[in-house]
């Protein structure tokens, strides 16, 4: 296979909304080895070419873009020193200060959204070749906005004319960043709540999540969203964001709307506003309001917690303008 391609060789569904729009904008196919991943990519990315193939029958092209580092790819496929692997981040969260997630990028090629990620990589003392590509997912959503508006009408059923909150927690990773099991509050009847559950949380706690959804089956203003990879169409639908350490918070900055962050315990102490300057993992928190678990219900009573100026500044620091077309000139052919 001579054409460069994207690659998802396992069931990493949280990679779909990064590799699918990137490949579609480049005119590259996306190679997938799991039928469930292929089905999601076909449904939610209208102009994407998908190559669905058994992992054991796959011969990789000489240039691939992946969210997995080279080590994982070469453990699954024969190593090829001439193969060029472009690493694409699956989000831009503030995770990684404790687990050194960027170490495998030493000497590799990293596609980055903007200056914030570049500074993050440098502070981790890693030196990959860096290519700035900007906020290509926003670019892709704007190109297909009508398609996604129609899709959302079909897939999300909520009362009209109400303030819509999105709760989009990350999963409980090695750093303990997730907040999903701490979210519990009575939702007023004049509000809607969409709960977007991380694919890794779904995979690990499927029976528990099924029971949880069943508890709210009679609530017409609460919607659990399990299979909807594209995040920008969803964010456009929502008036308020509730999160934790998820990178979705950075994506939501584009709209400059109210944001709340669920505070959880770390090393025996509660995160607080005073620590934001010292703790690099709390950078996004300046763009919203921190809420302790026992205060979650107060979120739905507040309407004017806006921080538009700082949100605009952090967005500009995080995302360049989309420059994805420029990548072709640096690929080794």
Image (spheres, helix red, strand yellow):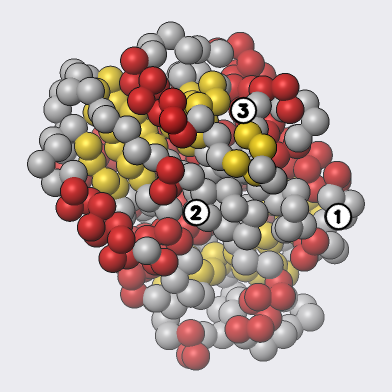
x and y, in percent, of residue 109 in the image: 76, 59
Q: Is residue 230 visible?
A: no
Give above or below for 32 relative to 102. below
Q: Secondary structure at mark 2?
A: loop
| Marks 1,3: beta carbons within 8 A | no
Task: Please give left or right for residue 283 compared with residue 203 in the image.
Answer: right
Residue at coordinates 43% horizontally, 85% vertically from top-left? Answer: 54
- Seen in the picture, residue 131 relative to 201 is either above or below; the reply is above
The numbered mark at residue 285 is 3
* Residues tagged 2 and 1 counted as in contact (Cβ below 8 A): no
Position in image of residue 144 (x %, y %): 36, 39
- Quadrant where the N terminus sits is bottom right
Residue 240 vs 207, above or below: the answer is above
Q: Nearer the viewer, mark 2 or mark 1?
A: 2
Quarter of the figure with the C terminus: bottom right
- Give the image quarter of residue 186: top left
The image position of residue 199, as x and y in percent, is 41, 58
Circle 1 is placed at which residue position?
126
Report the front residue among 292 and 145: 292
Which comes sooner in the sequence, label 1 or label 3? Answer: 1
């Amino acid at each position: 296979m001579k054409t460069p391609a994207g690659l998802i060789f396992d069931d990493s569904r949280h990679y779909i909304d990064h590799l699918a729009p990137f490949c579609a904008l480049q005119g590259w196919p996306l190679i997938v080895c799991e039928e469930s991943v292929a089905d999601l990519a076909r449904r939610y990315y209208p102009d994407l070419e998908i190559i669905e193939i058994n992992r054991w029958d796959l011969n990789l092209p000489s240039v691939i873009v992946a969210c997995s580092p080279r080590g994982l790819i070469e453990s699954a496929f024969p190593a090829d020193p001439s193969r060029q692997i472009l690493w694409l981040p699956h989000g831009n969260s503030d995770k990684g200060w404790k687990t050194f997630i960027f170490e495998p990028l030493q000497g590799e090629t990293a596609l980055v959204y903007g200056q914030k990620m570049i500074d993050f990589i440098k502070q981790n003392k890693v030196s990959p070749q860096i290519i700035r590509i900007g906020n290509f997912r926003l670019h892709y959503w704007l190109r297909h906005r009508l398609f996604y508006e129609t899709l959302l009408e079909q897939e999300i059923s909520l009362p009209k004319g109400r303030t819509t909150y999105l709760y989009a927690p990350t999963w409980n990773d090695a750093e303990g960043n997730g907040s999903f099991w701490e979210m519990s509050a009575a939702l007023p009847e004049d509000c809607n709540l969409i709960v977007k559950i991380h694919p890794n949380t779904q995979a690990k706690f499927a029976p528990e999540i099924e029971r949880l959804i069943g508890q709210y089956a009679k609530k017409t203003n609460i919607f659990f969203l399990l299979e909807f990879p594209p995040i920008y169409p969803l964010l456009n639908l929502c008036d308020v964001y509730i999160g934790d350490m998820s990178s979705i918070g950075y994506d939501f900055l584009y709209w400059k709307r109210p944001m709340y962050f669920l505070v959880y315990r770390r090393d025996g102490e509660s995160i607080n506003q005073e620590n934001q300057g010292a703790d690099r993992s709390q950078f996004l928190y300046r763009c919203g309001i921190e809420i302790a678990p026992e205060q979650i219900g107060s979120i739905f009573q507040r309407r004017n917690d806006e921080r538009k100026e700082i949100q605009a500044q952090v967005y500009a620091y995080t995302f360049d303008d989309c420059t994805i077309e420029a990548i072709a000139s640096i690929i080794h052919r």
